[in-house]
Amino acid sequence: EDQVTQSPEALRLQEGESSSLNCSYTVSGLRGLFWYRQDPGKGPEFLFTLYSAGEEKEKERLKATLTKKESFLHITAPKPEDSATYLCAVRIPSGSRLTFGEGTQLTVNP
Amino acid sequence: ETGVTQSPTHLIKTRGQQVTLRCSSQSGHNTVSWYQQALGQGPQFIFQYYREEENGRGNFPPRFSGLQFPNYSSELNVNALELDDSALYLCASNPGRGGEETQYFGPGTRLLVL
């Protein structure tokens, strides 16, 4: 069965303290790994799509990387406005549905 | 802004009632997917429609049903509401059918079943 596991469940950082969020997956024939940001009570906001091992993408303070078994979301010098839940999702060949992890709740204190 | 809108934003129902949630996809997006997100969890896939036909379904009972219309709008209907149906319901759209396209989410409808 396809599985997506995110860790840690929650992370507290001080402003400027860099860290990484992990998304490990067990799927057959990955057709894309997606990172979303979700603020409380709102819909997920698209951040990145990664398709193959070794691929990296960056946006402002965020950088996403992908291996054959996991993806990392690196946050460099975070700010309080980066506080949100970060969701990882995978897509498999049998359809275009997304299978999500439980998310990592990130809090950045000033 | 993703161009995906949902209505209503909040809704309160009682157990056993029926509810219809609505989604308006971005113009040109032929695929719409619906997800249920319980508090503190990741979204769970309910079903997907492509050009008005169901294109996949998750592990949800038949009392969850949907429709997609030619004008890029869609509906999620839930019959015989149960307390566990309380959740944030999200719709997402993308232009084609499957593939490696990104799904763009709406703001969601928060449903509370009492």
Image: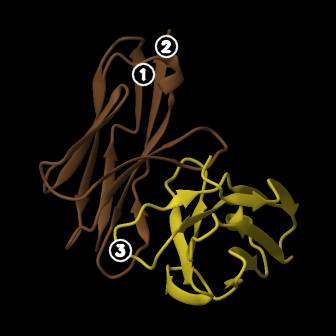
Q: Which residue is mark 3?
A: B99
Q: Nearer the viewer, mark 3 or mark 2?
A: 3
Q: From the top left corner, tell me how far across and down residue A7 is, in percent.
A: 32, 41
Please state the chain letter of the residue tagged with numbered disc 2 in the rendered image. A
Circle 2: residue type: Asn
- Graded by Cα atoms within 10 Å as few (under 14), some (14 to 19) or many (20 or more), the crowding at tag 2 reads some
Give me the chain letter of mark 1. A
Q: CA distance from mark 1 to mark 2?
A: 7 Å
Residue positioned 54% across, 83% down in the render? B50
Say which element carries label 1.
Answer: strand
Chain letter behind tag 3: B
| Residue A65 seen anywhere in this rendered image of the structure | no
Mark 3 lies on a secondary structure that is: loop
Q: Colour of chain B?
A: yellow
Q: Amino acid at mark 1?
A: Arg
Distance CA(mark 3)–CA(mark 1): 36 Å
Same subunit, tags 3 and 2: no
Q: Which numbered disc, 1 or 2, marks the residue that appears first in the sequence? A: 1
The residue carrying mark 1 is A12
Kind of residue indicated by mark 3: Gly
Helix, strand or loop at mark 2: strand
